[in-house]
Image (cartoon, grey):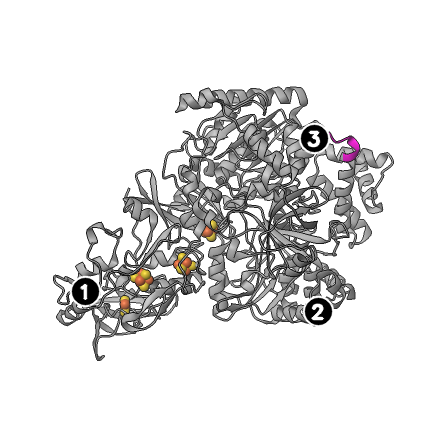
Amino acid sequence: MSLIKEVDYGTKLASSDVKVTLTIDGERVAVPKGTSVMAAAMSMGTAIPKLCATDMLDAFGSCRLCLVEIEGRRGTPASCTTPAEEGMVVHTQNARLAKLRKSVMELYISDHPLDCLTCPANGDCELEDMAGVVGLRHVRYGQKGANHLHGAKDESNPYFTFDESKCIVCSRCVRACEEVQGTFALTIQSRGFESKVSSGGVDFLASECVSCGACVQACPTASLTEKSIIEMGQPEHSKVTTCAYCGVGCSFKAEMQGERVVRMVPYKDGKANEGHSCVKGRFAYGYATSKDRITKPMIRAAITDPWREVSWDDAFTYAASEFKRIQAKYGRESVGAITSSRCTNEEVFVMQKLVRAGFGNNNVDTCARVCHSPTGYGLKMTFGTSAGTQDFKSVEKSDVILLIGANPTDAHPVFASRMKKRLRQGAKLIVMDPRRIDLVKTPHVRAAYHLPVLPGSNVAMINALAHVIVTEGLVDEAFVRERCDFADFENWARFIASPDNSPEAVEAITGVKPDDVRAAARLFATGGDGAIYYGLGVTEHSQGSTMVMGMANLAMATGNLGREGVGINPLRGQNNVQGACDMGSFPHEFSGYRHVSDEATREMFEAFWGVKLDHEPGMRIPNMLDEAVAGGFKGIYVQGEDIAQSDPDTKHVVSGLEAMECVIVQDLFLNETAKYAHVFFPGASFLEKDGTFTNAERRINRVRKVMAPMAGLADWEVTLGFARALGVPMAYEHPSQIMDEIAKLTPTFRTVSYAKLDELGSVQWPCNEAAPTGTPIMHVDHFVRGKGRFMLTQFVPTQERAGPLFPLLLTTGRILTQYNVGAQTRRTQNNVWHEQDMLEIHPFDAENRGICEGDLVALTSRIGEVSLRATITDRMQPGVVYTTFHHPTSGANVVTTDNSDWATNCPEYKVTAVQVRRTNYFSSWQDHDRETGVSLRRIAREAVDAAE
Amino acid sequence: MSSASSQDEKLVRMANQIAQYFTSQPHDQAVAGVVEHLRSFWTPKMRRQIIDHAAGDGAGLEPLTLEAVQQLAVSSSG
Ligand code: SF4
Ligand code: SF4
Ligand code: SF4
Ligand code: FES
């Protein structure tokens, strides 16, 4: 194994189809028009010395090290800023150039500390490399005069340092922050000798910096360096793998020393991220080696007993005997499982196979139930397949972006950077969200319209937008006639044109000014290629599925499907939520979204697996919990999912779990759900296993093992062990064999294999005989279901309404540095940015209640109460409060109700009627939770002693 | 422990919510839509429970929901 070094072309290779041919150092080379001389040279393997250029950034031309001679031109132009032209003759090396380069380097080195041997960048310093390349042997200028050798160090950021003395003011960091990340946190302050990098007059931690690390990656010296490199030194080998946090699915090089991660570096060839990352993926991997990891299987007869550590075999045997006993006593339907969107496709596939073929029922569900299940339903009804239509790259071609109920700068940061880049180029943005999210106004980006809908009124709003388009004659009739079922369209158009759906009529529901709605609709319909991006603010509503269909209708009516720059794009929460759904995690369908009642499909699975399969849908998570409370559901196997924290109405979830006789939890940590478990299977982090994740653009990316599983087994091996003990043999020796089975049984995966993924890097499904290298854009000539289907989307108000007792509406979301229930990020230094969940409240509502910044407040809904600290902000509109759910102690889900989407039971997290008042106490639930947090997590002392 | 009636109540609420989506469609299509939805996504036990509930006093079921559940009962027994 060796360290993967990606080629740095200095500037990007242009994407033009037109080629130009030039001669460099006597050799002819053809490159796309618009490519720089520097990149053209590199494409034939000639590295022209450079310092201020790197191919993640636009050329800048400041260091003058990359000078070349071009026949017929005067002087020595910088090769990074000079475009290659037809017939050009370039010389990159001769005595004159060498002399010039040496003097440039001499100046740099004269003002640079010469502690190279002990410098953290030793072995990875471009300045040192360039001194070697140009043959610098002595420096004429001493270090006595004015210099920067004693510049300040800024160590405020938990993950990297800024050492001014090592800075050569190349401005790569400043440009990375602007061009790649789009945050504009850095500037070059002053001019000439005085110039230096500044994070806005405060240290990095206090600055606008979002800690994405792009500047650190861009820095050619040790000036910006990862603290892990300072502590550990340089890595010796690396493997390409995929981030295990969000649904963007960024590719990384895990740079290693043996089995220790030294740093994670975003991979330029990764199609989802093209070399960029956010703070979570790049820096927050420390949880994988946290001391809180449980690495031994454990069992106990009752949840009040302390845990007993046992061998894997004993754990499997015990769990299997319990499940067999339960099924014998309470029937085949009395057990089930929940698959994890954090686990690999292969792991999810064997889980659902265990349920269907082993338990003999279809009681399998997944955490997508609580986030994007309406996406699956809505897009399947309208287009015929349960997935987003585009690749991420498509946003580079969008002219108008309609962003609904998503906050990408926090939840999908790398995609947000790509989107912001397009917005800076002039694309228009319409934001539909109750909160003034950052994208509404951020450096160099300002939304054309912000439609601050009241929580629960999405469908009324999407109908109003469509109403304007239909009644003002803005429908793309040609598209609709050719691509959609026209009778359905006519029905829909009649419905939507009804005055009840006009912006004026729905203002009382949505709270949005009709003029803004009309203007936004016109912009979307007439502004060029229009794309819709959306998040959980769409799905987590009682009309989540209706809203997904409403957006699909809008895209069809405006002809915005089937090419680059358009489409319907769900921004998926967890890393493998798309994959978990694709792999057959839902109780009513097999992999590839085929209903269990479909005879042909079922027969294929039965023949392959050699068992009879159930043709009726199984239970969803809420059904399992209801049935548990009612006494008929007794055993559950939960993989990598913390339903006691992430699912709504925590008290009901806990009652369900308490009513079961065998709860198996497989996780990295003793999470909230594990408090109610009888068997604990220790999980493996993404660094400890092979597999694949599928991101929000349907891209199947490889996950590669870089260290041995801490508990000895990868998650798929654990499921296999449990299956074996149950008498359900599954003989796989490597996850690649599981993928081969998935491919055989799933038409949209037919030609996916590890060999293909190694060769191509990644593919987007459908990947089969018809599309051997995958499908970046779906529904190009026709919809998967044939004709696109307009669905009626009548607005139905949620039953959860503000009233005299609960006058405010609570909505929930995420922040950048924490992830979901926080199990991972809370175990990293990301906590410096978010120690606790806060309740955001408008100044007006705060004043009415005598609430000041930082006060402890009680948040009460009709089903529960928790206390948390308030922060006062006018990002909220009056009447709406907001919180995150990253910390279990704040228990935001104690107040969320069991209201859910009509079609999929996706919980209505985004609307809960609440009251807020000042308090001096934590709620009784929080006290109880704190106490059980200790009492239900005890591990028998002897076992711990023996292990130590 | 929740009683059978609170389970029923929940199923009634869910079924009504499903029916509410279909109300904007022509009547026959709406009934068929609800039936199809229940058959595709509800477990046999849940379907039995709502059928039994409808056959009893049917408390809380909206007219469209009731009709759909009755149709579901006919097609299930047939
Ligand atoms: S870490 Fe990211 S946001 Fe912070 S200064 Fe560097 S590039 Fe900018
Ligand atoms: S910190 Fe690094 S990237 Fe930024 S100007 Fe200094 S040397 Fe260049
Ligand atoms: S954007 Fe998402 S996938 Fe990419 S590094 Fe951040 S958390 Fe990981
Ligand atoms: S690399 Fe071209 S001027 Fe610096």
Tell me whether the residue at label 1 lies in contact with that at label 2, contact meaning CB atoms closer than 8 angstroms.
no
For residue A514, the mark is 2
| Residue nearest the observer in this picture, A816 or A506 | A816
Q: Is mark 1 within 8 Å of ligand 2?
A: no
Q: Chain of mark 2?
A: A
Residue at mark 1: chain: A
Quick one: SS at disc 2?
helix
State left or right for residue A214 relative to residue A419. Answer: left
Secondary structure found at label 1: helix
| SS at mark 3 in the image | helix
Res A385 seen here: no
Identity of the amino acid at label 2?
A: Pro
Q: Amino acid at mark 1?
A: Ser
Packing grade of label 1 (10 A; few <14, some 14-19, many >=20) is some
Q: Which mark is residue A110?
A: 1
Would residue A67 be counted in the magenta stretch? no
Closer to the chain start, of discs 2 and 3, is 2
Q: Tell me where the magenta segment starts and ends, as one range.
A: B1-6
Contact, CB < 8 Å: mark 3 with mark 1? no
Residue A221 in sight from this viewpoint: yes
Q: Which residue appears at 66% of the width and 38% of the height?
A: A622
Q: Chain of mark 3?
A: A
In the picture provided, is A604 more to the left or to the right than A22? right
Which quarter of the figure is the C terminus of chain A placed in? Answer: top left
Find residue A869 and name its label.
Answer: none
Where does residue A847 sit, x and y in percent of width and height?
66, 58
- Percent across and percent down for residue A309 are 47, 23
Q: What type is the residue that disc 3 sits on?
A: Val
Q: Are marks 3 and 1 on the same chain?
A: yes
Ligand 3 within 8 A of label 3's CB? no
Q: Is residue A147 left or right of residue A94?
A: right
